[in-house]
Image (cartoon, grey):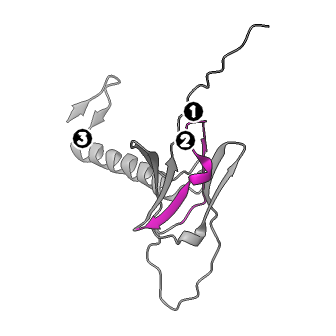
């Protein structure tokens, strides 16, 4: 038996039950909370000599499901969840597959050649290549004195 500071007796079995309840509630909130307002897709960004590679993890979607736009130097990547009711005679025991809408924004700097951005979707990963802009050498101009 264990005793806490308030002299409350806690048996190992009751402690186990409390922990199971706490963990169960935590996981239920994690997996089944429909009030997520900031759901985002995980992104990896890597740099090569010629470009930045942005990989968005988004399994189970199709390439037509994504919207990729550039407006005012902001690259926006989004997926809008479409409500679909599927009629089935099967009894659903557990349903954890849920596609949630998301939107990610990235500010583009002058280091990116926005006109050369390309994207592809393969094996659940949306890959966006952001080519680096060619560095502009400062121009040298001789100024004559009048």
SS at circle 3: loop
- Quadrant location of the C terminus? top right
Find out whether residue 119 is within the magenta segment: yes
Discs 1/2, front:
1
Q: Residue beneath label 2, please?
A: 133
Q: Residue at 30% across / 27% down in the picture?
A: 4
Q: Residue beneath label 3, please?
A: 11
Q: Are marks 1 and 2 in contact (CB under 8 Å)?
A: yes
Task: Please tell me how crowded label 1 is: few (under 14), some (14-19), or many (20+) other residues with Cα within 10 Å.
Answer: few
Q: Is residue 138 above or below residue 85?
A: above
Q: Is residue 81 left or right of residue 49?
A: right
Discs 2/3, front:
2
Image x and y of residue 125, in percent:
43, 61
Q: Quadrant of residue 111?
A: top right
SS at circle 2: loop
**Extreme top residue here?**
145
Q: Are marks 2 and 3 in contact (CB under 8 Å)?
A: no
**Extreme left residue here?**
1
**Is any part of residue 87 visible from this angle?**
yes
**Extreme right residue here?**
146
Q: Is residue 113 left or right of residue 145?
A: left
Q: Nearer the viewer, residue 51 or 100?
A: 51
Q: Nearer the viewer, residue 144 or 129?
A: 144
Q: Quadrant of residue 66?
A: bottom right
Q: Residue at 51% across / 70% down in the picture?
A: 61
Where are the magenta residues, as a range? 99-122
Q: Residue beneath label 1, please?
A: 136
SS at circle 1: loop
Task: Please tell me how crowded label 2 is: few (under 14), some (14-19), or many (20+) other residues with Cα within 10 Å.
Answer: some
Image x and y of residue 65, in percent:
59, 69
Please report whichever mark, 2 or 3, sits nearer to the chain's N-terminal start.
Answer: 3
């Amino acid at each position: 038996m264990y005793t806490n500071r308030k002299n409350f007796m806690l048996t190992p079995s009751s402690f186990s039950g409390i922990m199971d309840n706490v963990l169960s509630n935590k996981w239920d909130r994690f997996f089944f909370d429909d009030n997520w307002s900031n759901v985002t897709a995980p992104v990896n960004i890597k740099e090569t000599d010629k470009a930045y590679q942005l990989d968005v993890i988004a399994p189970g979607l199709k390439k037509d499901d994504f919207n990729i736009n550039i407006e005012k130097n902001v690259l926006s990547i989004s997926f809008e969840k479409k409500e679909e009711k599927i009629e089935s005679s099967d009894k659903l025991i557990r349903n954890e597959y849920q596609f949630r809408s998301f939107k990610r924004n990235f500010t583009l700097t002058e280091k990116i050649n926005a006109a050369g951005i390309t994207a592809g979707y393969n094996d659940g990963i949306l890959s966006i290549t952001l080519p680096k802009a060619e560095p502009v050498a400062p121009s040298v101009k001789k100024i004559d004195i009048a």
